[in-house]
Image: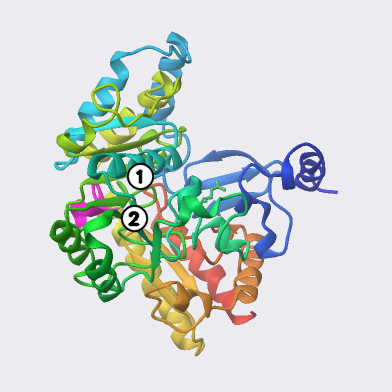
Amino acid sequence: MSKSSELFARAQKVIPGGVNSPVRAFKAVGRTPIFMDHGKGARLYSTDGEEFLEYCGSWGPLIFGHCRPEIFNAVNQAAQKGMSFGTCCEAEVKLAELMTSMIPNMDQVRLTNSGTEATMTALRLIRGTTGRKKVIKFEGCYHGHADAFLVAAGSGLLTNGVSSSEGVPEEVVQDVYVLPYNDLKAVQDLCDDIGPELAGIFVEPAAGNMGLIPPVAGYLQGLRDVCDKHGSLLVFDEVITGFRFCPGTFGMYAGVSPDITCLGKIIGGGMPIGALGGKREVMENLAPLGNVYQAGTLSGNPVAVAAGTAMLTLLRDENPYPQIKELGDIYTKGITDILTEKGLNYNFQRLEGLFTLFFGEGPQHKLEDVNRCDTEIFAKWFRMMCDEGIYFSPSQYEVGFISAAHTKEDIVYTLEKAEKVLASL
Ligand code: HOZ
């Protein structure tokens, strides 16, 4: 019996489903989870000693791969001074200063412990600021696991074949309107009706929890215009996209400015952290200045913010984005050539370092398009690539991440394995 299987058997006795986050159970890919022991650069090593060239990167934040010395050393030094104070500390001010200097439309930022906390607070904040209840979200977008967002949500819910969660009272979601992604007209039509009562719109500016779905031309600006027309607030959930496209937000990359941006693990270089930030007049409605409440002992934790500061400083000073783009170009060409050569009707979507190979005909613009994909074939692809030592995010509904720790040789190696596996699916 492998060590991973042994650990999974033990885990199932003491942790529901044996996992602390559902996608990790590998239910959708028809095998048991691989327990990882350590990571280095673009590679993960399992407890059984297997080596994986990986494209999950802890779901995005590891833009420099595992254990980049500057980030590791920052954590080490901070931890030696204390793990948690539950008080103000200089390090949290430094990270906030850095973030607001890198993101022009972020006058102020409130640090949380996860992306879920950030979006949950943003929801309360837009309702508190506007005095309105109604919000719009999109099918297949995932904004963490706060009650109001667990309707037609992406990521683990889609992976497990359920669109909403039990335990969420109807009253909590009755003011949440769900529309198809990338369909601006649907938003405009609904807002002709509910516009004056609309607190705001939540959107992943490039969707990354139903596979990768870029916004169609004009979509994000259209959402901005709808919000402006009705006095509503626009929230970009950038837990997946933040700092993946440029040393700032996807909003900056796309040239559209939201009222609030939510960020997650990415600003902690892999440590647990989250943040919401935006215009001063909105942010100042948060307690203790305003009456919208949010709090947390571990918010602004000195170790997490030290990691984040090291990470964002590296991103700003090293600018790894052209390198990641170049690797993405090589991978895209390689995969599309293989698909064409083999006459396979699958569709590869990619933006810079984010990608998804959809096992169905494309393009994928919205959840309905993704739902037509063959998840059984995806599962087979995932398992066979694992056997070849390549680890992708374990669901058709998640994205892959290319990091600055990957090399051209890594991409070429991955393509060789992909060609072999695609030929035998
Ligand atoms: N929902 C996460 C990806 N979008 C997965 C988190 C995890 O299992 O670590």
User: Which residue sits furthest right?
Assistant: 1
Q: Where is mark 2, residue-wise?
A: 135
Observer-nearest of 310 and 51: 310
Question: In this image, 100 relative to 273: left or right?
Answer: left
User: Three-letter amino acid code at disc 1?
Assistant: Leu
**Magenta extent:** 245-253
Give the quarter of the image for residue 306. Answer: top left
Q: Position of residue 246 (x, y in %)?
A: 24, 50
**Eyeballing the image, is 134 above or below 104?**
below
Q: How many marks?
A: 2
Disc 1 element: helix
Question: In this image, 424 relative to 396: left or right?
Answer: right
Q: Position of residue 274 (x, y in %)?
A: 39, 36
Residue positioned 32% across, 32% down in the render: 292
Residue positioned 34% across, 55% down in the render: 135
Q: Quadrant of the C terminus?
A: bottom right
Residue positioned 70% across, 51% down in the render: 33
Report if residue 394 is visible in the image: yes
Observer-nearest of 237 and 288: 288
Q: Residues within 10 Å of mark 1 (few under 14, many from 20)?
A: many
Residue positioned 17% across, 52% down in the render: 257
Q: Work out whether mark 2 precedes mark 1 in sequence or the reverse, and give the earlier one.
A: 1
Query: Magenta segment: does it hold 389?
Result: no
